[in-house]
Image: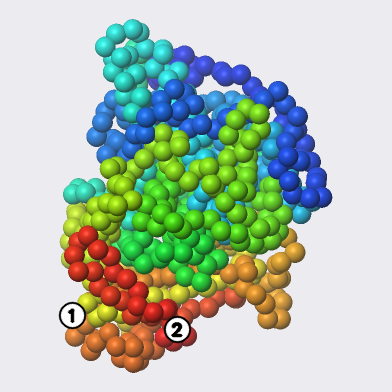
């Protein structure tokens, strides 16, 4: 059967646009070292790729990364973005700067990148440090590397346009373009859904040198070319030909269920808002903020829930495969943004030495990381110098910023506090969404508390990962009615408060500190415990307004929670499960409410256990 003319044109365009790029040298085999030292990891080669961000391609002026829906309002930058991303995804997977190899830095196939070999004999997994004080800082040069290569690909695409006004327009648009972020915690603007429609459309129309063409949307998925079952050796990722979100099955023909993913974010967004607000306003310790092994909620723990909510049984849930999904970069750009905002609010707090129990490709178990630890495999120069947390402390090092940070100085943080309150505080304006109005307004109320009762209550969810073989979501409810049905029906329940995702890590990251699923001995130390929180304050304040709760006093709340607090656990296949190693308790603290929109609430005293 002959192809339609439009399809022939599309194929010819893709062949012309995505020219083959030079291949890198064959990947060397992993080396073994007895002692971790970055100089021992370097594999001999002519030179290393310097990760410079956009300054590496000529523009050193910091421009803001925009929320993806804001970027979409600029048709020139939007077209440049998608042209660059599509071209990048088309690169030969053997190319060091291909989408495939850049995504592979995070996890699978656990191979060297840019000549940085494996560390000590017990090192494993990808380069990304999970459950680590380096979690926020390591992703900063990683994102900047992708932003740099994205710019290179967009520039190549623009160069193929004929000289004239359109080419000049796209060239100017590229100069100020920075990769977008997706804010999954703020209430979306009127008419928008929490999950952007731009990542849900399978096809997209682009402006190209000869007109327009409709192609596969590079934000929807990444198609492997080919799917390498040696690199991806675990089920079901060894059969999926492209990345999928909450897949319809474990088979090769599985479809992404973005409609269900979208509903999960509609029902769960308000609790993200409250968690983000708590972190930005009342957490001032870097180590606690940075990683999910902390005693309280953290930026990494919130980030984990976004991963499980998107991925289900698909790529985003599994750290070994998550970076292949294009939405990974939108999500992590937002995590970097929240980290940058936290930095501006807490300028003297930063990385301090902490032992990290999880191995990475280059670091051993219980390696002590500090602000000068090399952020492998990211080279600062072609001579092999690595970036460190200290050298990536400022986002402007890589010539980008975020809208909330523009014009903010150390003596004008009140402007930033006002911006945080407007986005995530109790006065954040409700917006339209696909959920029924009455439910939407209730969710808006549950977003961030007013702290009128001068108390903060949170459900703390702790999971010992040594017992965890599959990622799970833990759903928290307030109410005396039974909660039945599937997890999406649980979230529709009027008693639903929030969900936390606990990501199971590859066993290779745990090495000797893991317990078997049937071992009965008590696990000492809790070093592999993941901690997350579901804020309860806004829900309890609503109970007071509705007459179901007398006050926010500890004794009153304790009695109410003992009969009303419930939780359920489900795997990524949406089946309810009982899990070993799960502990749930309630923490509380006294709070001083803010007196204006330019102030934050503040804790008075320490967090205490209310009930367990």
Decide if residue 293 is on the left or right side of residue 217: right
Mark 1 / mark 2, whichever is N-terminal: 1
In the image, is residue 602 above or below residue 376? Answer: below
In the rendered image, the vertical position of residue 261 relative to residue 607, given as above or below:
above
Residue 130: which disc?
A: none
Q: How many numbered marks, from 0 up?
A: 2
The residue furthest front is: 411
Mark 1, other Cα within 10 Å: few <14 / some 14–19 / many ≥20: few
Please name the residue shown 70% across and 23% down the image: 46
Disc 1 element: helix
- The nearer-to-camera label among 1 and 2 is 2
Q: Residue 434 location in percent, x, y?
A: 24, 54
Residue occupying the point 29% across, 52% down = 411
Judging by the rendered image, the residue that carries numbered circle 2 is 609
Q: Is residue 189 left or right of residue 124?
A: left
Q: Quadrant of residue 567?
A: bottom left
Residue 220 drawn at (x, y percent): 41, 39
Where residue 81 appears, as percent x and y from the top left, is: 38, 29
Residue for badge 1: 545
Left or right of 328? Residue 520 is right
Identify which residue, 350 or 530, lies in the foreground. 350
Left or right: residue 89 compared with residue 429: right
Label 2 element class: strand
Q: Which residue sits at x=75%, y=29%?
A: 44
Closest to the observer, 109 or 399: 399
Classed neighbour count for the residue bearing mark 2: other residues with Cα under 10 Å, few (<14), some (14–19), many (≥20): some
Q: Nearer the viewer, residue 13 or 98?
A: 98
Colouring rule applied to residues: rainbow
């Amino acid at each position: 059967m002959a192809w339609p003319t439009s399809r022939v044109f599309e194929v010819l365009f893709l062949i012309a646009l995505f020219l083959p790029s030079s291949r890198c040298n064959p990947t060397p085999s992993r080396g073994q070292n007895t002692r971790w030292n970055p100089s021992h990891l370097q594999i001999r080669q002519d030179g290393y790729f310097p990760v410079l961000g956009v300054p590496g391609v000529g523009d050193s002026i910091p421009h803001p990364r925009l929320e993806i829906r804001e970027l979409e309002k600029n048709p020139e930058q939007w077209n440049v973005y998608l042209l660059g991303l599509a071209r990048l995804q088309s690169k030969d997977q053997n190319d060091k700067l291909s989408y495939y190899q850049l995504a592979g830095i995070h996890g699978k196939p656990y191979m060297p990148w840019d000549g940085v070999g494996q560390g000590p004999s017990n090192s494993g997994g990808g380069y990304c440090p999970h459950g680590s004080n380096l979690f926020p800082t390591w992703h900063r040069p990683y994102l900047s590397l992708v932003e740099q290569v994205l710019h290179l690909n967009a520039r190549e695409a623009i160069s193929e346009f004929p000289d004239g006004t359109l080419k000049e327009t796209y060239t100017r648009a590229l100069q100020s373009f920075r990769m977008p972020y997706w804010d999954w915690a703020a209430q979306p603007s009127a008419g928008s859904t929490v999950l952007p429609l731009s990542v849900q459309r399978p096809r997209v129309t682009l402006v190209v040198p000869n007109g327009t063409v409709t192609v596969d949307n590079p934000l929807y998925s990444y198609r492997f070319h080919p799917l390498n079952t040696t690199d991806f050796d675990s089920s079901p990722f060894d059969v999926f030909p492209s990345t999928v979100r909450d897949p319809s099955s474990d088979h090769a023909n599985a479809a992404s269920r973005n409609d269900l993913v979208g509903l999960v974010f509609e029902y769960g967004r308000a609790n993200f808002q409250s968690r983000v607000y708590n972190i930005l306003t009342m957490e001032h310790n870097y180590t606690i903020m940075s990683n999910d092994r902390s005693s309280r909620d953290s930026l990494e723990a919130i980030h984990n829930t976004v991963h499980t909510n998107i991925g289900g049984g698909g790529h985003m849930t599994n750290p070994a495969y998550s970076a292949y999904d294009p939405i990974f970069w939108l999500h992590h750009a937002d995590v970097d943004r929240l980290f940058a905002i936290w930095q501006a609010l807490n300028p003297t707090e930063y990385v301090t030495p902490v032992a990290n129990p999880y191995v990475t490709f280059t670091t051993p178990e219980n390696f002590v990381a500090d602000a000068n630890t090399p952020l492998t495999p990211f080279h600062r120069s072609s001579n092999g110098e690595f970036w460190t947390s200290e050298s990536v402390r400022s986002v402007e090092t890589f010539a980008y910023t975020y809208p909330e940070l523009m014009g903010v100085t150390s003596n004008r943080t009140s402007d930033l506090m006002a911006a945080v309150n407007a986005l995530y505080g109790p006065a954040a304006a409700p917006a339209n969404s696909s959920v029924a109005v009455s439910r939407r307004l209730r969710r808006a109320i549950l977003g961030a508390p007013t702290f009128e009762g001068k108390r903060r209550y949170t459900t703390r969810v702790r999971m010992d990962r040594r017992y965890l073989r599959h990622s799970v979501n833990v759903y928290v409810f307030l109410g005396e009615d039974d909660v039945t049905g599937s997890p999406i029906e649980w979230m529709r329940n009027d008693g639903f408060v929030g969900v936390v995702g606990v990501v199971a890590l590859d066993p290779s990251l745990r090495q000797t500190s893991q317990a078997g699923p049937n071992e009965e001995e008590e696990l000492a130390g809790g070093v592999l415990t993941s901690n997350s929180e579901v804020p309860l304050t806004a829900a309890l304040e609503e109970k007071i307004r509705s007459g179901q709760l007398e006050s926010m006093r500890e004794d009153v709340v304790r009695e109410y929670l003992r009969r009303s607090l419930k939780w359920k656990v489900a795997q990524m296949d949406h089946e309810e499960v009982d899990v070993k190693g799960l502990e749930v308790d309630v923490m509380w603290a006294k709070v001083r409410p803010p007196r204006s929109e330019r102030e934050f609430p503040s804790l008075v005293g320490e967090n205490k256990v209310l009930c367990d």
